[in-house]
Amino acid sequence: MNDREPILRYTANQRTNHWIVAILFVTAGLSGLALFHPALFWLSHLFGGGPWTRVLHPYLGVAMFVFFVGLVIRFWRANFIDANDRLWLRRIDRVMLNKEEGVPAIGKYNAGQKLLFWTLLVCMLVLLVSGIVIWRAWFSAYFGIGSLRLASLLHAFAAFVLVLSIIVHIYAGIWIKGSMGAMLHGWVSRAWARKHHELWYREVTGDKPARRPGQKEG
Amino acid sequence: MASQDIIARSATTTVPPSARHQQEVAKLIDTTKCIGCKACQVACSEWNELRDEVGHSHGTYDNPQDLTAQSWTLMRFTEHERDDGNLEWLIRKDGCMHCAEPGCLKACPSPGAIIKLANGIVDFNQDHCIGCGYCITGCPFNIPRISQKDHKAYKCSLCSDRVAVGLEPACVKTCPTGAIVFGTKDDMKEHAAERIVDLKSRGFDNAGLYDPDGVGGTHVMYVLHHADTPRIYAGLPDQPVISPLVGLWKGITKPLALFAMGAAVVAGFFHYVRVGPQRVEDDEHSEPVDNGVRQVDPAVHVYDPGKPGGQEEQRP
């Protein structure tokens, strides 16, 4: 096996699904932020004004949820949190400083990525349910005023957590060189895989942790 | 209305024009004088050129059944049985209360769609309304209604157009019993006080004025024979306040959340500036690095896929 050969981290379908969700997040997010605080109401002009922002936002949100379910189906199995992840989280200070000593080798996803996955899933579910309750054009008539008030609050809170999580997610992609390429064109270098996701690298390539001379490679 | 008369404006964080001072006005509805003729409903429709669809009788005198985008005021009839077994017919003209601290204005996300005028009137500007319905969520009195035709919110304007030129609201002008009167808020309070003295002398010991503090007072007030139990008047809230949930939703949390999101972006930028990106070293391309350092860590051994049972992750 050629050590210089790159590794496919995400298939074309996985990448497409991810970026559909990303585009819908940006559009749903900007239209939602327009209504979140007066300082951001100008964002409504991106969608053709206030009424169009109000009309489009829930449809964008529902579409984002539907495609996000696609990502969940593709990736949920790789996101179970285990003891190794807890150790990684205890060493998060070293991770943040680009230090690798004492940071455990990890599989396809590190604990931060896994926590992000579950946080996004919870936020998306809360946003969907509360969003349906406050969707005036179709559903609000079926709910009492108490539900509407609670749903409005939960919707704003879940959106806030989601936006914060995505800010972290996007920064991680900028910070960890090579990960943006993994989601854009799909490929990562073997060195990248070994450095950032060693257990996954060994699993994909069949490499042993420390190769003895003369051992046949798989 | 001159723009100087607007003293509060929805979704606006700066101080609105407040150079002019006007006396606060109020409409006083005396439920003890109301005969339920609905002339006020007709006058409202006529002046504001509203034509609601003809509905169906649900076995009560309420007609229409509820406030709508085309019905801004409504007589609500309650058959109240007193403790002594006698029946009392309570009739309350429902509609916007024109709160001094309007929940609708607090909840509205569209700049200028809801305004409060210097004379106390809370008015909707449908041209700026986006149809989200947050005013309904914010209102303690369940007043605004969204039109199914144009998806704009509507409610009683206290005939702001008439009041601006020195006329009383249409419902006041038409009321045949003098149950609805209009003037400065101070005058209306004085008038109410006289009415309450009269009612008490007639045996209504709990007669009183409904001008709830929880919303800073209102510019539509009621004289009630039973001011100790407003709820018996077709659910008039005993202690109306802007819901704490709405306060939390639209209060200090919003600017704090906005700040936190901005801070997260700035924190990321400075992390990049101070710690820098994580790059894969070029020399790592050739041979696998000796990861002996990690292997001293016992936790790593557990997850060594070379050992049976060490593999916990499956690729999807």
Image: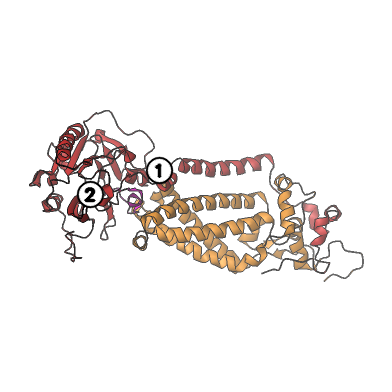
Cα separation, mark 1 vs mark 2, equals: 28 Å
Any mark on residue B171, and which?
none
Q: Are marks 1 and 2 in contact (CB under 8 Å)?
A: no
Any mark on residue A38, and which?
1
Amino acid under label 1?
Answer: Pro
Please tell me whether mark 1 sits on a helix, a strand or a loop: helix
Q: Chain of mark 2?
A: B
> Which residue is at the far right?
A214
Instruction: Tell me which corner region of the image, top left, top right, bottom left or bottom right, holds residue B286.
Output: bottom right
Q: Colour of chain B?
A: red
Residue drawn at point x = 13 percent, y = 53 percent: B36
| B106 to B147, vertically: above or below | above
Amino acid under label 2?
Answer: Gly
Please tell me whether mark 2 sits on a helix, a strand or a loop: loop
Membership of A184 in magenta stretch: no
Tell me the mark number nearer the camera, choosing from 1 and 2: 2
From the viewer's perspective, is B188 left or right of B228? left
Q: Main secondary structure of the magenta part?
A: loop
Instruction: Decide if residue A16 is in sight here.
Output: no
The residue stretch that appears in magenta = B126-140
Colour orange, chain: A
